[in-house]
Image: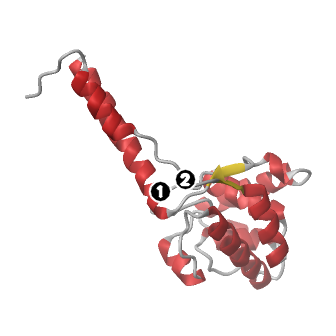
Amino acid sequence: MFQVKNGFLIAVVMHLFTAPVRAEVNVDLYQQIDMAAEKHGISPVVIASIIKIESDGDSCAMSHVGAQGLLQFMPKTALMIGLQDPFSPAQAVDKGAELLKSLLIESEGNYLDMAAMYNAGGKGKSLAFHELPDETQQYLVKFNDTVNKGTHNWKTLLPNYVLGTTREICSAIREQKEEKSVLQRLTALWQ
């Protein structure tokens, strides 16, 4: 059993586990999207809309099924397209734009089919809307709405700067949040 004197133990524990984890730099997301759009020949509105739907601009986003980063790549998809670190905004936006362009070509220029295939992990075939799973139908409605919102100025969809992260930094941030949550509960018990 610990003996707490004047909150000293709490202060030491809080300091050890809550020191901020920082990325090296913030990344200009607008610039990354513009460069990838130009490089791969796809509209920045499309790239920004997919990022908005997938992660809302959170470079450390991780879904309950394991999708990772700004564009929520599943590990298998990341491997398939040669993406080394889905948490790196620069890598994710570039490889995401490349994948979106290839899906747009495969769907013969149909943006909704492209988005449906993206939602299916970068594969699939064109189906009538009513033949798609409910999740994909909802995704396409979001995609269409987001594209319409971003048509005049796609930069209103996302923050200009995002955390310049890596897999390791995002992992450390998640661990820190979990530890902070545990410490907050412990602190409440001690008071």
- Residue 58, horizontal then vertical, whole percent: 60, 51
Q: Which residue is mark 1?
A: 169
Q: Which residue is mark 2?
A: 23
Q: Is residue 113 above or below residue 72?
A: below
- Image quadrant where residue 43 sits: bottom right
* The C terminus lies in quadrant: top left
- Count the labels in the image: 2
- Residue 67, horizontal then vertical, whole percent: 51, 63
- Residue 48, horizontal then vertical, whole percent: 75, 58
What amino acid is found at the position of numbered circle 1 in the picture?
Ile
Is residue 91 something one can see in this rendering?
yes
* The N terminus lies in quadrant: top left
Residue at image location 67% in from the left, 81% down from the top? 125
Q: Earlier in the sequence, mark 2 or mark 1?
A: 2
Which one is in front, 171 or 98? 171
Q: Is residue 53 above or below residue 16?
A: below
Residue at image location 31% in from the left, 39% down from the top? 16
Tell whether 17 sits left or right of 55.
left
Distance of label 2 from label 1 (alpha carbons): 7 Å
Tell whether 74 sits left or right of 25.
left
- Residue 171, horizontal then vertical, whole percent: 42, 56
Residue at image location 59% in from the left, 72% down from the top? 120
Callout 1: SS: helix
> Furthest residue to the left?
1
- Image quadrant where residue 14 sits: top left
Residue at image location 81% in from the left, 56% down from the top? 147
Kindly check if marks 2 and 1 are in contact, taking CB atoms under 8 A apart as contact. Answer: yes
